[in-house]
Image: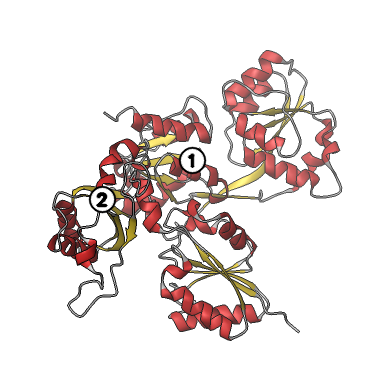
Amino acid sequence: MTTTGCVHLIGTGPGDPLLITVRGRQRLAAADVVVFAGRCVPDRLLRWARPDAERIDVDAAGSGASDADATHRLLADRAHKGLTVAHLTAGDPFASGAAADAARYLHDRGIRIEVVPGVLRLVAAPGFAGVAIAGEGAADAVLVVPCGPATSDGAPAVDWNRLAPSDATLVSEGRGSELARMGDELLRHGSSPAEPATLVLHGTLPAQHTIEGSLREVRDAARELADTATGVLVVGRNSRRRASLRWFDARPLFGKRILVTRPRAQAAAFVDRLADLGAEPIEAPMIRIAPPEDEGPLEAACAAAGSFDWIVFTSVNGVDAFMKRLVGGPRDIRALGSSRLCAIGPATAAGLRRYGLEVDLMPAEHRAEGVAAALRRNHDVAGARILLPRADIARAALPDELRRAGAAVSDVAAYRTVPITDAEGIDVSRMLRERRIDVVTFTSASTVHNLVTRVGPESAAALLADVVVASIGPVTADAARRAGIATAIVPSTYTVPALAEAIATHFDSRTP
């Protein structure tokens, strides 16, 4: 007999995927099935789901959840099969009636539920805008004013005669027309037109926009928005303190839309760092990592690993491909014997460290030429047996230099970089034409080649002419140059974290 599963109704918070609660993230990571509305749940949030979890976007055609009743049936169906279901809801599950209806439906059918509250936009948006709704300098009371339900004349059912003259801080969330109507009621019933007010649109997101001024000015701004945006309105003297409390929109990359072409499986840390610096990362991976077409040479190299004097790793991809093959069969880490290890840079060295290995050499210059120079300068490589497990299309500069120095080099394809022809719903060419991308990042020559292929070799240089291009190092920048693309940013250290910081410095230095 199948045991009925559980449905977790999880509030994802106000918009920023990092504002989901710890419990919400734990429940999401443990779920067999993840149900969500694609228009409300960011992709970055879904990366915490299990890779093997069933993902159902109720907004997608063919999802079987075209309306609320269908979604309820879908949740019940998966739970009755004994599965654990995570139902993601923007904001807080019980802040709107939809999740409460789902909870009642499931309860009536004997299905166990858990509600995981989410951070409310009413609280988060003012905080991200630098508006302290309580505390020193603010009013003694904070009142949440509903924008609905409305009375027959369209005004919210609020006692404005008592509310407008009060000294309380007023907070409300709604569409532009609803917040404008609230401003009208406050002014009509005694609020001063000069009362400080702040309107926060797209709170906690890179697109966040804050309008501040008098109640009358902010009311007028809300009216112009009509119903094109939902915002949070704060009315009260604490709005005056924003200049000293703002932080979110003061970050160096705030509002910058940055294209990330790195493989999705490796882009998480880069994307998070760009977001921390204020950017809106747009993930459009140009390549994916795949095993070599012929895995025989890699297997032979792993079998003979202990016979090499040096094993030189030029990327984290090479580390993972080689080590997984090395320990994936009857061998273990001892198969490396007395071979010494060289890593091209700190990220590659960290990749080896995950396998319990420390490097014997890391050059100061994190590129192939630096590796060859460091080996020749610090060690006698004449006659040395050197293994290079790396990409199938890696440059010949490193093995050529080592062979000229007298080394016996085994250059083995450990992995392939495969072009991604599907932009995963992102039309990169159109975004570039419409100037909706501020920065394009390249982390390898392959990402350059495949973006050029995707947008068209004849169009690439023109489309990127007015975009800031950031390349991880001189080799990648040279690949861009050969495609007619000028690189504006190259970090002094050729690593992904350094690339993020270099982009931030580039824009921060131009801030008045």
Q: Residues within 10 Å of mark 2 (few under 14, many from 20)?
A: many
* Distance between mark 1 and mark 2 Cα atoms: 35 Å
For image coordinates 30% across by 60% down, the residue present is: 172
- Examine the image and state in which quarter residue 352 appears: top right
**Mark 1 vs 2, N-terminal side:** 2
Measuring from the top left, give residue 452's x and y in whole percent. Answer: 40, 46
Q: Which mark is residue 408?
A: none
Q: Quadrant of residue 477?
A: top left
Closer mark to the observer between disc 1 and disc 2: 2
In the image, what residue occupies the spot 52% across and 34% down? 497
Residue in the picture at 57% in, 81% down: 107
Could you tell whether 25 is left or right of 276 in the image? Answer: right
Q: Are the residues tagged 1 and 2 within 8 Å (C-beta)? A: no
Q: Which residue is mark 1?
A: 273
Residue visible at 66% across and 50% down in the picture: 291
- The amino acid beneath tag 1 is Arg
Q: Secondary structure at mark 2?
A: loop
Q: Where's the C terminus, which quadrant?
A: top left
Q: Say which of 239 and 501 sits in front.
A: 239
Q: Position of residue 195 (x, y in %)?
A: 18, 50
Decide: is 188 above or below 304.
below
Horizontal side, residue 321 vs residue 489: left or right: right
Q: Would residue 227 be visible to someone looking at this image?
A: no
Q: Which residue is mark 2?
A: 236
Q: In this rendering, would 108 be left or right of 274? A: right
- In the rendered image, is residue 404 in sight? yes
Could you say where residue 272 lies in the image, as x and y percent from the top left?
49, 44
Identify whether 448 is placed above or below 284. above
Query: Which amino acid, by three-letter code, is at mark 2?
Result: Gly
